[in-house]
Amino acid sequence: MVTELVPAAAFPLQSGLVPRGTRTFVFESIFEVFLLLGTLVGIVVVGYMLYNAYKYRSGSGNGHIDDGDRLVLGELPSGSGGGRKLFTSFFMSMVIVVSLVSWTYLTLLYVEEGPSDAESLDVEVEGYQFGWRFTYPNGHTTDGVLRVPADQPVQLTITTADVFHNFGITELRVKSDAIPGQETETWFTADEPGTYTAQCYELCGAGHSYMSAEVIVMPPDEYEAWYANTTADNADADSATANESSLRPAVAP
Amino acid sequence: MTDASPERDAAADGGHEVAHDDHGHDFPGTGSIKRWFVTTNHKDVGILYIVTSLFFLVLGGVLAWLMRIQLLAPRGLGEGILAPVAYNQAVSAHGLLMVFWFLSPFAFGFANYVVPLQLGAKDLAFPRLNALSYWLYLFSGILFGVSFFQGGTFSGGWTMYAPLSVPTFTPDVGASTAVLALVLFVASVTVSSVNFLTTMHRMRAEGLTLRNVPLFSWTILLTAWMMLFAFAALLAALLVLSSDRLLGTTYFAMESPAGALLWTHLFWFFGHPEVYIVFFPALGVMAEVFQTFTGRRIVGRKWFILAMVLVAIQSFAVWMHHMFLTSINLQVKTLFMITTIGISLPFDLMVFALIYTMLKGKIRFTTPFLFVFGALLLFIIGGITGVFLGAVVLDYEFRGTYWVVAHFHYVMVGGVTALVGGLYYWFPKMTGRMYDEFLGKLHFAVYFVGFNLLYFPLFVAWETPRRVFDYAPELAPWHQLATVGGFVLGLSFLIMFYNLFKSAFVGDPAPDNPWEYATTAEWAVSSPPPLENFDGTPTYRNGHLEFLDAGEVAPGEDRSDGPTGAAVSDGGVTASATTAVTADAELPTAEAAEVEGPSHASIWPFVLSAGAFLVLLGLSPLQDAAFPEGMVGAAYATTTVAGGVVTLGSLVAMGLEPFHGPVFEEGEAWPFAGIDNGKVGMWIFLASDVVLFGGFLGAYVFTRVAFGWTGWEPIPSDPIPGLVNTYILLTSSFTVVLALVAAEKKHKWGLVTSLGATFVLGIGFLVNKGLEWQHLFHEGLWLSTNVRASTFFLTTGLHAAHVIAGLVIALYLTARAWRGAYLEDSRSVEYFGLYWHFVDIVWLFLFPLFYIL
Amino acid sequence: MVSTKLYTAIYVVLFVSATVQVLVEFAGLSYWLAFGVIMVLSAAKAVLVAAYFQHLRFEPRSLTYLVGIGLAAALALTLAASYSLL
């Protein structure tokens, strides 16, 4: 596996076979393998199918169905032979699928376990029609902009103020449902400082298409400087500049 | 054994012991408009289903086009042809129409037409109920259409996630109408499932044991079983949702503990089997067409069947894989990941079986084969991309994206591809004319290119969130490609419509069997088949299809020319020996009824469905159990009442109408041999009702667990009224038992008195309940007070509705018993008893759960 | 099949056990013990009604299995959904 892509120090859990690292890394490692094998299996199976469809086309003379075991109108249905081949292929496909999924299950356990509380930044996320609110450990709340430090795991606790939403930052491969009356948890780590987009992935009403938030990944020291200036009562100025907020009144029901 | 009895209506059965018979002689011809309103013949109904479903395909397709036009570029607010809410409506209606009003009915059009032929039956077990299924389906579709004009249809997606689906967030009347249309649709499906299951288990020709049933019929059998249970769960979900919308209960409200999760459970418990419900018939078409056009029997037939049976059972144990990102715990996720992988494996076997069937064959690339072959290719791609979703870590990221959209379109529209192949395959049988082969192949070429142009780019653009029209600009080229593909795919159907429409009138006449190597029984009769399908009685007693003349029932000599020894040893020879004897004994009855001939016409299924349509349309504007103010409200209320009158009236008329289903000699009837069709139908219906109440009780238990089980006090502070009602219901069950005993002893006044007593006790139950509710209302408890009150009123209310339905039947039975009915044939009383006792049993659980625990 | 006398006896048993169910509630048992007893009583009554009043006992077993399948589906939904909350 391509484990050398991960900064080893940050992820002591890593081992050779099971990808461990950022959510992006975990996803990409598994997705690549699936894509590769899936394409391979697809090409083999479809190729085999097309080849045989051509080989046994009517008039090719390759088939021999008229040698005494011809299909007759009104016969009771029965099967052809070829069971061994059928079971060999079935067994092979089973081995591929089961081993692939078992392999990813180990990764699932890693993802579910999440980062330890000590090292992670906890942020509460609340969806509403049609935007996202973020609350930091000190009680500081922002609307439409999530600021996080690079290279530190961020633990999200997600819920909603109204309907069912789904909070996802596709570039960082993190996503979770926002369900009324329930809390879900997920986490991510961003390697690269920069600006990403969080979007809603569950149909939630008229403004669904525009229910996004900015995710600003900052160098850790800049983040610390910004965070030190926030307080619980500080209504955030960022939200005013978020491009969705101007749309929001127009699409509210 | 022989069921020479009249058709029985599971819901409102009446005796049909009327000597007078208006049978097939004045049945109008297919050229007459009247014929299509009164027909109960399975082939007519099949054609109605197919034509109607194609209409909904066009409707759903146009909505898809609107979406694809909107998606040509990322749209800012107010850009594009659809406003945001209109887009959401298009998304939702497209999904609902395609899944419910197109896919399944299209497949069941073929099922209606072909299955009785493949079984060797003259018609379905309950022909009028079959017509009823169709009309309920049509009117449910019309009701859905009406919803567009009531301020806008439902806009919460086809998955209808709560609480967006409640009026707080989607207040349009049209949204309620759409939900009610689904309720009506489910009614149609339930009636249809009961009918198909009874027919397929009870009415197979002699020698046609279940394992010998052709694969298309096998897929329909399994589909009907899944529909029976899955749609009952959906009905529970929809009734609760309707109640939240119309009566103001708060199951799914934002404030309800785990209301949103409750919906996901109820919906996906139905939703996952639904995937196989729409796909299995396509699989059956694939299997039939592969065998015919390769000239080979399918490889590993019994493993193929076993794989399908496993899938059908397991489909009820995978639903939470649609919910991996909700708050369900890791243990449950693990369990459902395993069952999900488990359910994918049988499909591998089926795909390989189909592929290996081609080997050594003589493959003819006719239009049906091309479509089915293409469908298998598409299904392979859909299947491989589905394995990605089975890996939970990948699913976490694919959730809510176009990966899911692309995957399920490859699977579901892949299924459509096979069904289109089925349409070409059976078109000559249905119309007696051949379609144009060149145009058929052209259709396939354009269709296949359009399909992949439409759906493959969606895999590439998978990072697009579902149901948005403002996406990352770099994905725009892929979406534009998809839009072009959408138009190619859609327009390819014009070729088909032109081809089939023209060919139906001027195509070359089709022989009985236009396909070399076809084996199933529908090809052994003329194209189109005669009204009652077969000239003689079909039998497989000698291992192959034969038709016996009316007098010829003793085991005849082998009339076959072909080498069928293998098939004979495979067939149920021992079984057929015994059934031959019974068939012989029963023949005189059959012959006598044959002289009268079965009825084929009834207008009441149409009228009844129209009535149900009016009732639901009238109820649609309700909010908090009240009609809107003013003229509009009055008009709606009037519609409800008028619809109710029509519905009740047509039920009674249907009960009184002399109607004879086709006579049949019981051949193979495992596992219901020797049980009357009516009784089997009633029990199958009750099994679905078990799931309906199970859904309601499940919703109650789930909500209570989320709330905190022991912190939840029963709504009635006093269990005594409930106990009294328990006494009343138990007593009424006892009087129904006495009624049956009296009927069997031909004791007329005993029968009338017992039925009358049952009716009075039922009224007593309702009055007592009414007083109790009145009391609770005065205490300030109402349906919307809290979720505890909602579950109490709605669940016991559903039970009361069952009591009321039972009372209508009891009244009908009493009136007819008064006039001397049921003494010769007490089955109506018996079936009513089965229903009534079931209602009693339900109360035995409701009482402790809602009154004392 | 069954004499009217037996039907009557079953009716009496049902009537009495419904009464017992309510008495159990007031017997001062712990909640979950009472819960168990009451549900077992309900199930027993249901079985009696199905077996004799609906005469499933005297029908081919397939009808019983049919209803059992419906019951199993409903229980699977209820139990798995509720468990997923825990």
Image (spheres, coloured by chain):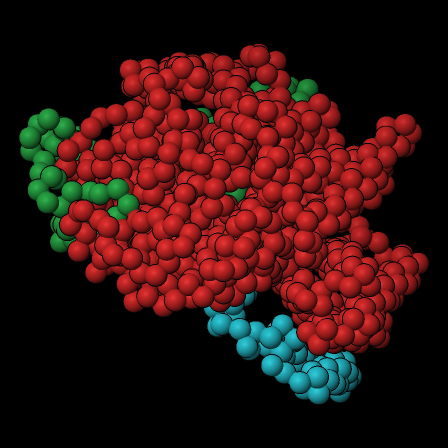
| Visual hue assigned to chain A | green
Furthest residue to the left?
A61
Task: Name the residue at 82% across, 63% down.
Answer: B818
Residue A246, x across and y down, in percent: 64, 19
Task: Name the residue at 59% across, 34% down.
Answer: B27
Q: Identify which residue, B70 or A91, lies in the foreground.
A: A91
Chain shown in red:
B
Residue B58, x across and y down, in percent: 51, 22
Task: Name the residue at 79% across, 35% down.
Answer: B618
Q: Is residue B473 visible?
A: no
Count of numbered circles in the view: 0
> In the image, is B571 to the left or to the right of B687?
left
Residue B513, x across and y down, in percent: 30, 33
Is residue C21 positioned above or below C61 on the image?
below
Q: Identify which residue, A144 or B467, lies in the foreground.
A: B467
> In the image, is B93 to the left or to the right of A215?
right
Is residue B13 positioned above or below A213 on the image?
below
Position of the C terminus of chain B by quadrant: bottom right
Q: Is residue B173 visible?
A: yes
| Visual hue assigned to chain C | cyan
Is residue B532 positioned above or below A212 on the image?
below
Task: Name the residue at 15% across, 33% down.
Answer: B362
Residue B169, x across and y down, in percent: 70, 35
